[in-house]
């Protein structure tokens, strides 16, 4: 979820998405991250594999990490490392392919 965490908050870190933060503005990426969040949260995967609950989009330099749960018969918690040009469609495709035979030990999926 996107939230503005006060800069003196113990929750403030370089991984938080801030629309405006002096010296560390993520404004251009923030809009792209919000779009990714809104496009994926609540989506149902083809094949009835479950529904996505997106918790957060984290940014570290050019890297983006999507923290989510795939909720179905079983709930799987995953982090996806997204390439800078990854689209919501690429994320859904990667999750659908993974969900065909989910490996419960998988915690990080890479999406280009």
Image (cartoon, helix red, strand yellow):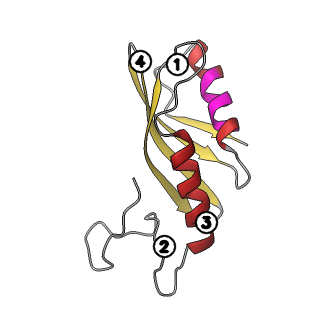
* Residue that appears at 46% across and 20% down: 104
* Residue that appears at 70% across and 55% down: 84
Mark 1 and mark 2 residues within 8 Å of each other at the beta carbon: no
Q: How many marks?
A: 4
How much space separates mark 1 and mark 2, taking CA atoms? Answer: 36 Å
How much space separates mark 3 and mark 4, taking CA atoms? Answer: 31 Å
User: Which mark identifies residue 29?
Assistant: 3
User: Which badge, 1 or 3, comes first in the chain's sequence?
Assistant: 3
Is residue 92 rendered magenta in the image?
A: yes
- When asked about the image quadrant of residue 2, the answer is bottom left
In this rendering, would 108 be left or right of 75?
A: right
User: Which mark identifies residue 72?
Assistant: 4
Q: Which SS class for mark 2? A: loop
Q: Position of residue 85 (x, y in %)?
A: 74, 52
| Magenta region, residue range | 90-96
Q: Which SS class for mark 3? A: helix
**Residue at label 1?**
103
**Residue at label 2?**
19
How much space separates mark 3 and mark 2, taking CA atoms? Answer: 9 Å
How much space separates mark 1 and mark 3, taking CA atoms? Answer: 31 Å
User: Which mark identifies residue 69?
Assistant: none
């Amino acid at each position: 979820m996107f939230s503005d965490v006060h800069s003196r908050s113990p929750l403030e870190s370089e991984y938080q998405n801030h629309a405006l933060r002096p010296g560390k503005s993520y404004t251009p990426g923030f809009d792209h991250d919000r779009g990714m969040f809104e496009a994926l949260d609540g989506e149902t995967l083809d094949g009835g594999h479950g529904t996505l609950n997106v918790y957060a989009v984290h940014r570290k330099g050019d890297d983006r990490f999507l923290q989510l749960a795939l909720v179905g018969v079983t709930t799987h918690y995953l982090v996806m490392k997204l390439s800078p040009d990854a689209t919501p469609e690429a994320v859904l495709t990667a999750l659908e392919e993974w969900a065909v035979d989910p490996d419960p030990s998988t915690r990080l999926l890479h999406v280009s």
